[in-house]
Image (cartoon, rainbow, N blue to C red):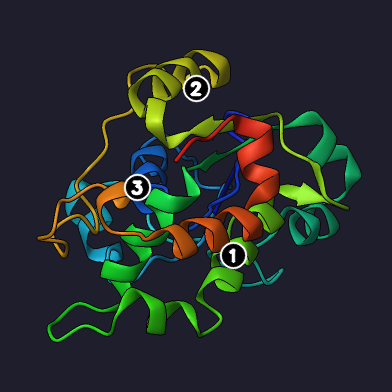
Amino acid sequence: MIISHEYKFIFVKTTKTAGTSIEIALSKFCGSEDIITPIYPEEEMRNQLGYRGAQNYLPDGFYNHISGTKIRKLIGEQVWNSYYKFCFERNPWDRFIYFFYWCILSEPRPSIADFMKSNRLSFLKKTGFFLYTIDSKIAVNRVCLYEKLNEELEQLQIKIGLPEKLKLPRAKSSFRKDKRSYSQILDEAQKKQIAEVFSEEISLFGYKF
């Protein structure tokens, strides 16, 4: 998560939406007073690039995947309402498969069915939709779509007034060797279960299986 007083924006960081890469790219433009939460182990990557690392987050208790509700409480209504707030969302079926391979890095992996029996879907909901909504209503100025990543980044650069384009490093991108589409992996029951949990996102952003 980043709160930039320099450019007056708040980046609410959801999971499995290229959030770490985006956060690293945004760090390049942060000033000494901005709030940047730590990212591990990618903090070293940010340091190697010469960008600002984690800073100013401890006194008030900010952390990586903090919700909009908590951010608003910590920074106050005036800053929350006056800063440009954004996050990223992703097709829930695609996001789940990405999450599956990220959680289980080595073979043999459990089946998708067994993986889904845990609270994995609930975790994704809590670190996605519940972060950028307050009382089930979108609380940020823009929910950017992962599927239009380059276009969204170009628009963000203009909107928040960055002096140059956002260049994303390749963070957390080397763990998945199976490049099949989610539509080739999930069966009908799994498709429906994900659709039920993420019905709000599917309705809001028009996602299709």
Residue named by callout 1: 57
Q: Residue drawn at (58%, 68%), measured in percent from left and top?
A: 63
Q: Nearer the viewer, mark 2 or mark 1?
A: 2
Residue named by callout 3: 24
Q: Nearer the viewer, residue 33 or 161?
A: 161
* On-image quarter of the C terminus: top left
Q: Nearer the viewer, residue 115 or 167?
A: 115
Tag shown at residue 117: none
Q: Is residue 162 above or below residue 98?
A: above
SS at badge 2 = helix
Image spot of residue 33 (x, y percent): 58, 47
Q: Amino acid at mark 1?
A: Tyr
Q: Amino acid at mark 2?
A: Leu
Q: Nearer the viewer, residue 171 or 120?
A: 120
Residue named by callout 2: 156
Image spot of residue 145 (x, y percent): 49, 32
Earlier in the chain: of badge 2 and badge 3, it is 3
Q: Quadrant of residue 26?
A: top left
Q: Is residue 52 above or below residue 177?
A: above
Image spot of residue 207 (x, y percent): 53, 35
SS at badge 3 = helix
Q: Nearer the viewer, residue 85 or 185?
A: 185
| Residue 58 appears in view | yes
